[in-house]
Image (cartoon, helix red, strand yellow):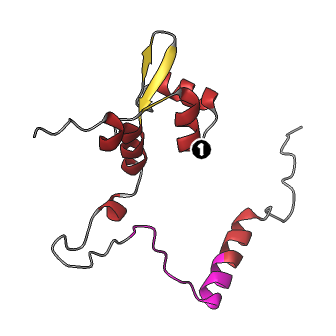
Amino acid sequence: MPQDPPLPEQIGLKPLTLKAAASLLGLHPNTVRDQVRRGIIPGAKIGRNWRFLEADLVAWIRAGYPEAARMQLSAQSKEALWHSGNVQEFTTSSSQARTERSLDALLERPTGKRPKNITTD
């Protein structure tokens, strides 16, 4: 017995309207429309309406992830761990205070005597 081909919705090819795409991306429809026109977000204008594929929008979102967050440490391990490139080292309070003082010193106005007018008679 032959199987029916999968529906587009089942394979991530669900077409979305401009409002639905904006909702998925968490943006205003005007922002989405502008970014599609500039070629930033994938989409197509069919007739008078913009159409988007859900899979394309999800892939576009994933493309914005940092490279380290997209790479698996081991694809063969049972529990593949994901690592992030946004790890920050902790600073101790003394080094932080020293950094703050040096930055404050750079922002201070120079003090001292005003330059004298150098005019000759």
Q: Position of residue 60 (x, y in %)?
A: 39, 42
* Nearer to us in this view, 117 or 80: 80
Magenta stretch in the rendered image: 84-99
Residue visible at 31% across and 75% down in the picture: 81
In the picture, measured across the screen, residue 64 lies left or right of residue 79, that is right
* Nearer to us in this view, 51 or 40: 51
Q: Position of residue 28 (x, y in %)?
A: 64, 35
> How many numbered callouts?
1
Name the residue beneath numbered marker 1.
Answer: 26
Choose top left, top right, bottom left or bottom right for residue 82. Answer: bottom left
Residue visible at 64% across and 90% down in the picture: 94
Q: Above or below — where is 109 with respect to 89?
A: above
* Nearer to us in this view, 8 or 70: 8
Quadrant location, the N terminus: top left
Residue 45 visible here: yes
Residue visible at 45% across and 16% down in the picture: 45
Q: Is 85 one of the magenta-colored residues?
A: yes
Q: Above or below — where is 51 with respect to 75?
A: above
In the picture, measured across the screen, residue 59 lies left or right of residue 5, that is right
Q: Above or below — where is 68 with respect to 49?
A: below
Q: Above or below — where is 99 with respect to 71?
A: below
Q: Position of residue 39 (x, y in %)?
A: 42, 26
Amino acid type, mark 1: Gly
Residue 38 visible here: no
Q: Is 111 one of the magenta-colored residues?
A: no
